[in-house]
Image: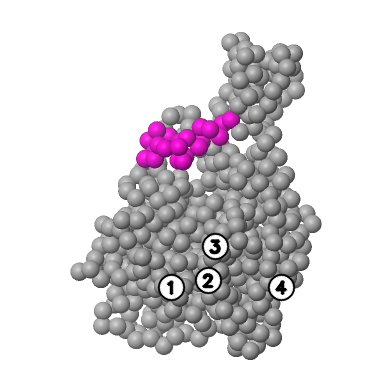
């Protein structure tokens, strides 16, 4: 079970007990004042000789305490005993939000070549299963074959769940034939990032030391999608321990250009979705791992508000920052997936239902939307050039939105990222101490092995100071959005430090493809734009972006993989 946490609290030795009585090692008499002086300088402090002499006994004894703590085995899913929520004291949720307008099922026909539906939306794939003679078994077999063929170039699959998928698909077909419809995801093939456990299949976390790891049980989000009728066809690649696109087998590639990586760490989820190899996928984000591969592969995606989706059965990297969300081709698809996976899970004590209720759908006609007074905030530095802002601004205004300038709070966000560094090093403490981190493929400065080692020198005092600043940032961020009275922010994905800031505060974000008047990127792929929403207003955020996307279908492009299909 994964339980989010706000702080890593250091356990203390019980009063009156020596380290040896606690089961730890004896005092280390070899430790000298000079060692303490050097250690203090490492963390930017200076102490007098007298102060260092006074400290020496405590520090020697603490080595034994550390040994006691390390003697207790801890599984990855065991979280610290403190809590985290984006709803800190003083923040008041909005009374209500709007969601997506109910959509009629599109009219479809079975194509001569079933593979022609590979890039269809979830809604169209669902209509295909209900309006034609196409079965979920056929659809699943098509996507499985496509994955097997294209994976030679994409390297997006770690494990195919073929037997499970075909059995699920056959059951879904029988249910539809009997009049039992589980909802919009019924019979739709999908893929999951290989951080999430699936009973009977290995869960590798993309890392060589865990290549053959088989966990008991199934992640809550997988079980919820099973219940919604979706058909799991693959465990998709993840950059080792949720960093980048390099895993123990290969580097996952972009379907737009096989020479380019897909970014990560939800590498396979974005690559497979963009390549039309799954109907949708799940990814995770701690600091850009949903947004970044969606930018690289030009997919639509939701990074939910922290806590809206259970992480039970999912690898823990940072208890206070990890989030699970959908990667799709269309934002409307992300809304359908989110509806199936969101909500409190008893096995994840800090998951929760949304604090903001959905009062009704976003108004339909543009004239009605103008009366609604939709307000979109534009942060300072949101776009690197005026042309990008001008074009998107025009499209948003055409759908009835008023754009208003917003000044976001300023905090030392990069320094506050010791939150992620310290928690990740804690989650993989045993990996570092055992030396098994040497087996990870990437052994450079900006990779986990070095980051984990350096994190051992982050003082607990500074970690907790970062959490106190985080509380102020969370308060001020929500206050800015409240005073500006905006429904969402629009910005380039990496502009103005918004991505790290909102990963700390827990705000939701949607990323979507965008083709400017100047045309797509050199490889033919669309650029991307991000929309950040109010806390727990995930449904509202997706409704806004889905409306914009529906009114501007020119932004949706798919890679030409016809040569690879021959």
Residues 234 and 545: in front is: 545
Q: Is 450 drawn above or below residue 515 in the view shown?
A: above
Disc 1 target residue: 518
Residue under the point 66% across and 38% down: 463
Disc 3 target residue: 384
Q: From the viewer's perspective, is 163 left or right of 175?
A: left
Give the quadrant of the C terminus: bottom left
Q: Residues within 10 Å of mark 4 (few under 14, many from 20)?
A: some
Across and down, in percent, residue 524 comes to 36, 68
Residue under the point 61% across and 61% down: 381
CB under 8 Å between discs 2 and 1:
yes
How much space separates mark 2 and mark 3, taking CA atoms?
9 Å
Disc 4 target residue: 96
Disc 2 target residue: 387
Does residue 57 appear in this view? yes
Does residue 228 appear in this view? no
Earlier in the chain: of badge 2 and badge 1, it is 2
CB under 8 Å between discs 1 and 3:
no
Q: Residues within 10 Å of mark 2 (few under 14, many from 20)?
A: few
Across and down, in percent, residue 348 comes to 60, 52
Magenta region, residue range: 437-457
Residues 400 and 468: in front is: 400
Q: From the viewer's perspective, is 283 left or right of 474?
A: left
């Amino acid at each position: 079970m994964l339980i989010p946490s706000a702080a890593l609290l250091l356990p203390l030795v019980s009063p009156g007990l020596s380290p040896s009585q606690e089961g730890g090692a004896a005092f280390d008499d070899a430790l000298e004042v000079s060692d303490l002086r050097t250690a203090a300088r490492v963390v930017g402090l200076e102490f007098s000789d007298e102060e260092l002499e006074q400290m020496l006994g405590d520090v020697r004894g603490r080595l034994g305490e550390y040994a006691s703590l390390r003697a207790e085995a801890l599984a990855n899913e065991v979280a610290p005993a403190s809590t985290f929520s984006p709803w800190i004291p003083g923040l008041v949720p909005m009374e209500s939000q709007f969601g997506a307008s109910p959509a009629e099922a599109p009219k479809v026909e079975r194509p001569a070549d079933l593979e022609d539906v590979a890039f269809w939306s979830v809604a169209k794939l669902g209509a295909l299963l209900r309006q034609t003679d196409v079965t979920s078994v056929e659809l699943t077999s098509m996507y499985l074959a496509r994955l097997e063929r294209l994976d030679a170039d994409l390297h997006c699959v770690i494990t195919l769940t073929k037997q499970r998928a075909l059995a699920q698909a056959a059951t879904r077909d029988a249910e539809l034939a009997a009049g039992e419809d589980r909802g919009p995801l019924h019979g739709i093939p999908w893929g999951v990032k290989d951080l999430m456990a699936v009973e009977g299949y290995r869960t590798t976390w993309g890392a060589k030391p865990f290549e053959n790891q088989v966990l008991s049980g199934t992640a809550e989000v997988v079980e919820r999608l099973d219940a919604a009728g979706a058909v799991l066809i693959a465990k998709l690649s993840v950059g080792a321990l949720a960093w980048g696109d390099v895993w123990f087998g290969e580097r996952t590639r972009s379907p737009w250009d096989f020479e380019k990586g897909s970014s990560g760490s939800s590498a396979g989820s974005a690559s497979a979705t963009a390549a039309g190899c799954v109907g949708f996928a799940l990814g995770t984000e701690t600091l850009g791992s949903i947004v970044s591969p969606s930018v690289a592969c030009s997919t639509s995606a939701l990074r939910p508000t922290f806590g809206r989706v259970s992480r039970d059965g999912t690898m823990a990297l940072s208890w206070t920052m990890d989030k699970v969300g959908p990667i799709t081709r269309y934002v409307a698809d992300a809304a359908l997936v989110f509806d199936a996976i969101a909500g409190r899970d008893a096995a994840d004590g800090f998951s929760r239902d949304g604090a903001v209720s959905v009062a009704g759908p976003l108004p339909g006609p543009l004239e009605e939307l103008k009366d609604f007074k939709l307000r979109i905030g534009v942060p300072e530095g949101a776009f690197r050039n005026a042309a990008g802002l001008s074009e998107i601004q025009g499209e948003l205004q055409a759908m009835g939105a008023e754009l208003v300038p917003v000044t976001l709070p300023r905090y030392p966000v990069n320094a506050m990222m010791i939150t992620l560094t310290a928690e990740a090093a804690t989650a993989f403490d045993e990996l570092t101490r055992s030396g098994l981190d040497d087996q990870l493929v990437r052994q450079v400065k900006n990779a986990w092995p070095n980051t984990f080692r350096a994190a051992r020198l982050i003082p607990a005092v500074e970690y907790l100071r970062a959490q106190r600043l985080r509380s102020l940032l969370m308060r001020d961020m929500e206050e800015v959005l409240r005073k500006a009275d905006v429904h969402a922010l629009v910005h380039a994905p990496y502009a103005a430090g918004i991505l790290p800031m909102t990963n700390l505060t827990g705000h939701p974000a949607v990323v979507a493809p965008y083709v400017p008047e100047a045309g797509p990127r050199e490889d033919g792929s669309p650029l991307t734009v991000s929309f950040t929403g109010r806390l727990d207003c995930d449904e509202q955020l997706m409704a806004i972006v889905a409306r914009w996307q529906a009114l501007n279908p020119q932004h949706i492009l798919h890679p030409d993989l016809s040569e690879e299909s021959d």
